[in-house]
Image (tube, helix red, strand yellow):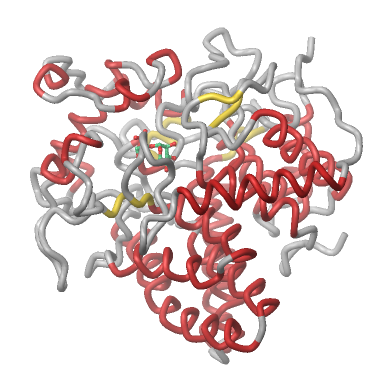
Amino acid sequence: MHDHLPPTPALKPDMSAELWNSAVRVLETNWAGDHMVPSRRLYPHQWSWDAAFIAIGLAYVNPTRAWRDLRSLFEAQWPDGRVPHIVFDPATAEADYFPGPAFWDVPAYGNRAARGSTGIVQPPMHAIAAWEVYRHAAAHGANCAQEARTELEWLYPRLVAQQRYLTTDRNLGRGGLASIVHPWESGLDNSPAWDEAMANVPADLALLSQYRRRDLDVSDAAHRPTDLDYSRYVGLVVSYRAEGYADAGLLDRHAFAVECPAFNSILASAELALAQIAGELGRTAEAATHRHRAAQITAAIIRRLWNEETGTFHALDVHTGKLTPANCVSGLLPLMLPDLPADLVQAIMNEMRSNRFGLPVPSYDRTAPDFDTMRYWRGPVWINVNWLVRRGLLMHGFRDEAEDLRTAMVRLVHRNGHFEYFHPTTGEGLGAPTFSWTAALSLDLLADRSVPAYAKAG
Ligand code: 2M8
């Protein structure tokens, strides 16, 4: 039995205007001077992949802020190229977010003071964002076009350094993919995709009596990761922190290393966006290199993460060499890759259309016994992953489904508000109520019906 959100009629113009205006208000509220916070109460710093999704939408209403947000993030890039998953706002108290700057205890680097960021990463959405912001900025006139050119030139080498870090220092499995070394690096924090690998991570609940979770002060415990999850999250930070977040030899001393299909699909897509950027900047030879790298990462995703039996992609536990069994939305995201062979595209479409998922896609298989309609990345619908799914649908010529998904997302947010995530059957808003990427991507869904430049001919 399906219990997906009902199909929706065409959007009414007043609905679009209301949604547009409310999204703009959220982005106004969450602007913090030189960066956007994901939400004022729950996430009072700057987050890496949030900044990318936010910039994509902010480009329509304030391209200068979209560029500023990306610049603030990349100003905190480490010398090795890693872009930290949180850039801490020095004006926010340690107690306002856990784990905060003192817990991460990142050393000073470049011209940045110590404790300015975390030492882990998030999916590299930023090249895609930079290209999207650039494409849309021109519509704001000559000054914005000039600004866009300057910002793109500033970002390009930094985006290349980010890719270098992920494809070399993080190639822990030596198979051509980046490993995540903490579930937070996936952005899909408590996804069942990590359950098997996390079972091998020591859980020390005593760590949580030492440090207090701040998220439970401002949100419902039933909607958040459990204490057991958090004790492992904290333990993994302690382990990575012990050697100053060094990656050499990490596999031998760190309990969690996983190759995620979503993270790596974004990594390959970033190379394609970099090819677009390099082409625009007149760097033809580099553009060809980026396309070649995208093809290599795509081939590695297929070689290492495809599961013939389930007909979908799964996360690979690098320590055991095994694919994890859970069917998660991350397994559908290789649809973003234009070079995915037709039979695999078809298999993902079958999976997406089955009663395990359906549009908008939930974060986890609806038929799984532990599918949880409330708990964060273990069931609820998220706008950013559905935005990526829509991109995949457009990439492979599924225009009608892409349009149905766009309409469904717009109606979901219009009806329920700019929530962080949504109940997968009722559509009720969950988590933070004025969440930046939901607002920003709503703007994009209202404004942009174009197909990615490197999509397959439809
Ligand atoms: C969530 O993750 C943070 C840790 O990074 C948290 O739970 O405190 C995730 O949804 C992640 O994808 C997102 O970037 C972050 C901020 O919105 O919140």
Instruction: Look at the image and tell me in which quarter the N terminus lies.
Output: top right
Q: Residue at x 78, y 62 (%)?
A: 450
Which quadrant of the figure has residue 456? bottom right
Asked if residue 186 is positioned above or below residue 287 in the image, the reply reads above
Of residue 13 and residue 68, the one placed in the foreground of this image is: 13
Of residue 234 and residue 441, the one placed in the foreground of this image is: 441
Asked if residue 92 is positioned above or below residue 248 in the image, the reply reads above
User: Taking the image as four quarters, which one is ligand 1 found in?
Assistant: top left
Q: Residue at x 18, y 29 (%)?
A: 235
Instruction: Look at the image and tell me in which quarter the C terminus lies.
Output: bottom right
Of residue 30 and residue 349, the one placed in the foreground of this image is: 30
Q: Position of residue 357 (x, y in %)?
A: 70, 25
Which quadrant of the figure has residue 405? top right
Q: Residue at x 14, y 37 (%)?
A: 239
Q: Is residue 21 left or right of residue 149?
A: right
Q: Is residue 241 left or right of residue 220?
A: left
Q: Is residue 359 left or right of residue 384?
A: right
Number of residue marks? 0
Asked if residue 410 is positioned above or below residue 275 in the image, the reply reads above
Q: Position of residue 139 (x, y in %)?
A: 70, 77
Q: Position of residue 444 (x, y in %)?
A: 68, 55
Q: Position of residue 342 (x, y in %)?
A: 78, 49
Q: Residue at x 25, y 52 (%)?
A: 88
